[in-house]
Image: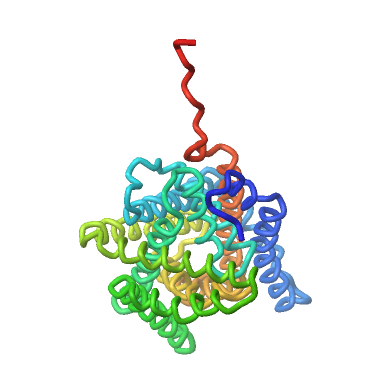
């Protein structure tokens, strides 16, 4: 188990193998969708349509769209900092780099590994307890997912979206998952004793009865769970103003990514229905809560994104695949940014050089 206080934590979390795996997964999902396109057009590939898209693409507009999309990660970092006690002095660039590093881990490994790794990096760089950072990250993520579901529902209700009936259940399931997760998280924050009691009855019980090494591992995990329970309770008592601020930053992140995708579409010569782009991004983002625990979840997200995009913006298949590919390219840039940030972060707490003795 990697200790968040280890001075080498940041280096161990971002090995070249981790970065290459993350990039391979990100690009692999686009490759799979391309293979599906070839399978759908085995004798008549739309080469002319692809050439037309490339010829009509405005490079400056495309770069602008990518930059606006990437800006959303800074808003995600500020959202996290808003719910993190004693983090007001943590710089936005540093925390944005940590968020990107966590994204890299989420691509390389199934499940919410990135959340854990990012929390460890906050401890390593800024001296904030990893459990406190993790609790704030969980709260912030659920706020973002919940708002994504709400935005998707509002767009569905008030915009004229040509959504096929077969996709209604997918959106409903994603919304229910978000609501259940947010409610469960709120209960854990309000009643941290439930976590402590559950850990006492399971990990605490096993720690006293398992063989030496297994018992020690169970005890360390038990202590970590107790720390996380205390941190969840602490984050839950920050007050309504902090939660409203985090919600506003979450909305800013969603708006930034949606606008970036729309600008990129315009740069490629498409004219998608903006509410459809908003619905597509928010619905696919909301649904990720049901996919993140499974390997290859990026492929599922891409498939959902492509399906919603074509249904709500009336883009053609090749155009939709172009947008999905562009979003994945932007994700690869974020992965590289996350890896690079680990080499240019601030010094770990407790590692600062001592001042010279002027009396020597």
Residue 212 quadrant: bottom right
Task: Give the residue furthest to the top.
Answer: 359
| Image side of residue 315 versus residue 135, left or right | right
Q: Is residue 270 visible?
A: yes
Task: Give the residue furthest to the left.
Answer: 240
Residue 95: percent from left, percent from top: 45, 47
Q: Of 352 and 308, which appears nearest the observer?
A: 352
Q: Is residue 6 above or below residue 285?
A: above
Residue 228: percent from left, percent from top: 41, 65
Q: Is residue 99 above or below residue 92?
A: below
| Image side of residue 306 versus residue 245, left or right | right
Q: Which quadrant holds the N terminus?
A: bottom right
Q: Is residue 306 visible?
A: no
Residue 2 quadrant: bottom right
What residue is drawn where x is 47% and y is 75%?
287
Q: Of 171 and 62, which appears nearest the observer?
A: 171
| Image side of residue 28 versus residue 144, left or right | right
Residue 35: percent from left, percent from top: 73, 72
What residue is drawn where x is 61% and y is 77%?
210
What residue is drawn where x is 59% and y is 49%?
9
């Amino acid at each position: 188990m990697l200790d968040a206080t280890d001075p080498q934590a940041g280096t161990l979390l971002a090995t070249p193998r981790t970065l290459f795996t993350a990039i391979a997964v990100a690009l692999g999902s686009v490759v799979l969708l391309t293979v599906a396109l070839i399978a759908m057009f085995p004798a008549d590939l739309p080469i002319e349509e692809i050439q037309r898209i490339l010829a009509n693409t405005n490079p400056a507009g495309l770069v602008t769209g990518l930059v606006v999309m990437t800006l959303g990660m800074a808003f995600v970092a500020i959202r996290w900092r808003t719910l993190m006690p004693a983090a007001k002095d943590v710089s936005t660039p540093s925390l944005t780099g940590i968020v990107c590093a966590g994204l890299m881990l989420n691509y390389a490994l199934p499940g919410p590994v990135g959340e854990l790794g990012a929390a460890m990096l906050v401890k390593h760089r800024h001296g904030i307890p990893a459990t406190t950072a993790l609790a704030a990250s969980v709260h912030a993520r659920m706020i973002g997912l919940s708002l994504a579901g709400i935005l998707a529902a509002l767009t569905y209700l008030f915009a004229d979206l040509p959504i096929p009936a077969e996709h209604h259940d997918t959106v409903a399931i994603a919304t229910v998952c978000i609501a259940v997760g947010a409610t469960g998280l709120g209960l854990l924050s309000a009643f941290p004793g439930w976590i402590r009691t559950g850990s006492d009855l399971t990990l605490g019980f096993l720690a006293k009865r398992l063989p030496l090494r297994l018992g020690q591992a169970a005890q360390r995990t038990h202590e970590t769970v107790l720390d996380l329970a205390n941190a969840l309770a602490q984050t839950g008592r920050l007050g309504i103003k902090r939660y409203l601020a985090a919600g506003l930053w979450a909305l800013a992140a969603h708006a930034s990514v949606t606008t970036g995708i729309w600008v990129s579409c315009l740069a490629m010569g498409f004219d998608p229905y903006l509410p459809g782009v908003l619905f597509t991004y928010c619905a696919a983002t909301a649904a990720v809560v049901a996919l993140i625990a499974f390997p290859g979840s990026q492929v599922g997200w891409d498939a959902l994104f492509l399906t919603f995009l074509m249904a709500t913006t009336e883009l053609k298949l090749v155009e939709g695949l172009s947008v999905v590919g562009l979003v994945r390219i932007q994700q690869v840039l974020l992965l590289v940014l996350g890896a690079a940030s680990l080499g240019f972060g601030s010094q770990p707490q407790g590692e600062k050089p001592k001042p010279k003795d002027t009396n020597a």
